[in-house]
Amino acid sequence: MTVEFLQGHYPYVLVIVLLLIGLYGMTLKGNLLKKLIGMTIFQTSIYLFFIQGAVKTNATIPVFSPELGPGAENYMNPLPQVIVLTAIVVGVAITGVALSLLLVTQQRYGTIEEDEILEQMRQAE
């Protein structure tokens, strides 16, 4: 039964795997660039989850068609795609700011390893 369940829900399994990879990168890696990459993978898994949740079989684009009629069940909901598109734009902006902060951190401390930066900050106190 579990194999059939996984085969029927493979997009969600992929989302969970990507989410766990991103969470692992964000929490257990010491390199700040690897943490940023983990955050980006985590964000991507959330985008895929929203898009997968919006899938509707045998539906078409949300433009009225006389042969399909006015029924909402015949058309895709465009709202999840719009939300994900907005989230992608925000995610790219966050990644850009984080990369610039990494550059400043590298110039100031000479490293982007979290434990070395914390040690230098403790010594400065």
Image (tube, rainbow, N blue to C red):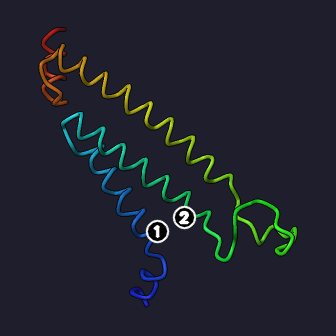
| Residue at the image position 70 percent from the left and 68 percent from the top | 60
How far across and how far down the image is residue 24, in percent? 28, 51
| Residue at the image position 48 percent from the left and 58 percent from the top | 48
- Residue furthest to the bottom: 1
Query: Circle 1 is placed at which residue position?
Result: 12
- Callout in the foreground (1, 2): 2
Please name whichever residue, 76 or 112, is drawn nearer the observer in this view of the structure.
76
How far across and how far down the image is residue 116, in percent? 12, 26
Please name whichever residue, 66 or 60, is drawn nearer the observer in this view of the structure.
66
Where, by quadrant of the figure, is residue 58 drawn? bottom right
Local crowd size for mark 1, using a 10 Å CA cut-off: few (<14), some (14–19), many (≥20):
some
Please name whichever residue, 110 or 69, is drawn nearer the observer in this view of the structure.
69
Regarding mark 2 in the picture, which secondary structure is present there? helix
Give the amino acid at mark 2: Gln
Q: Earlier in the sequence, mark 1 or mark 2?
A: 1
Checking the image for residue 52, the label placed there is 2
How far across and how far down the image is residue 114, in percent? 19, 30
Are the residues tagged 1 and 2 within 8 Å (C-beta)? Answer: yes
How far across and how far down the image is residue 16, in percent? 40, 63
Horizontally, residue 101 falls left or right of residue 94, namely left
- Residue furthest to the front: 66
Depicted 108 relative to depicted 72: above or below: above
Regarding mark 1 in the picture, which secondary structure is present there? helix
Give the amino acid at mark 1: Tyr
Depicted 28 relative to depicted 120: above or below: below
- Quarter of the rendering occupied by the N terminus: bottom left
